[in-house]
Image (cartoon, rainbow, N blue to C red):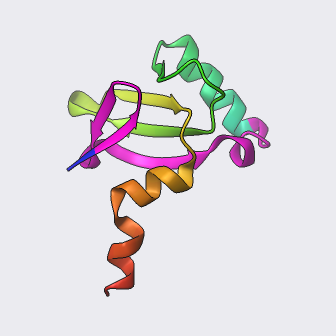
Amino acid sequence: MFLHLGQDTVITFNEIIGIFDLDNTTVSKITRDSLKKAEDKKEVITVSTELPKSFIICQSRGNKQKIYISQLSSSTLLKRTGFVEGLANI
C-alpha cells in the first residue's frame, strides 16, 4: 500500500517508521537536534512550500533513512493509512 504525503510524494507503508506532529515533537531539544543532523546529512525531503505540520521518518531498502516534512497533519496521514480503522476491527 502507498501513502500520499502531499504534492507529488508517495511512499510505501513498509518504509514508514513513524508519523509525528511537528509542533508537539519539536518542543524536545533531542528531536530538534535529530532533525538538524538529518538535514545536514541531506536526509530531509520537504514535500511542500506550505507551512509544515508533520514529519515522517522512513527507512528504505539498504537501510537509508529519509525524513519527509509534510504540510498535512499527522492525524490526516494516519487516517490515510487506515491503521486506526484497522484497530477498531480487532
Q: Which residue does the image show at 73% across and 39% down from the upper left?
A: 26
Question: In the drawing, does residue 3 fall left or right of residue 69?
Answer: left
Q: Which residue does the image show at 38% across and 29% down from the upper left?
A: 65
Q: Total of numbered circles in the picture?
A: 0
Residue nearest the viewer, comparing 49 with 19: 49
Residue 29 position (above or below residue 47): below
Q: Which residue does the image show at 50% across and 52% down from the upper left?
A: 76
Residue nearest the viewer, comparing 34 with 83: 83
Q: Give the range drawn in magenta.
A: 3-29
Residue 20 position (above or below residue 7): below
Question: In the drawing, does residue 52 fall left or right of residue 70?
Answer: right
Q: Quadrant of residue 8?
A: top left
Q: Is residue 13 magenta?
A: yes
Quarter of the image for the C terminus: give it. Answer: bottom left
Q: Residue furthest bottom?
A: 90
Residue 4 image position (x, y, % from top left): 34, 39
Residue 56 image position (x, y, % from top left): 47, 39
Residue 18 position (above or below residue 61): below
Q: Is residue 56 magenta?
A: no
Residue 29 image position (x, y, % from top left): 78, 36
Residue 34 image position (x, y, % from top left): 62, 30
Residue nearest the viewer, comparing 44 with 9: 9
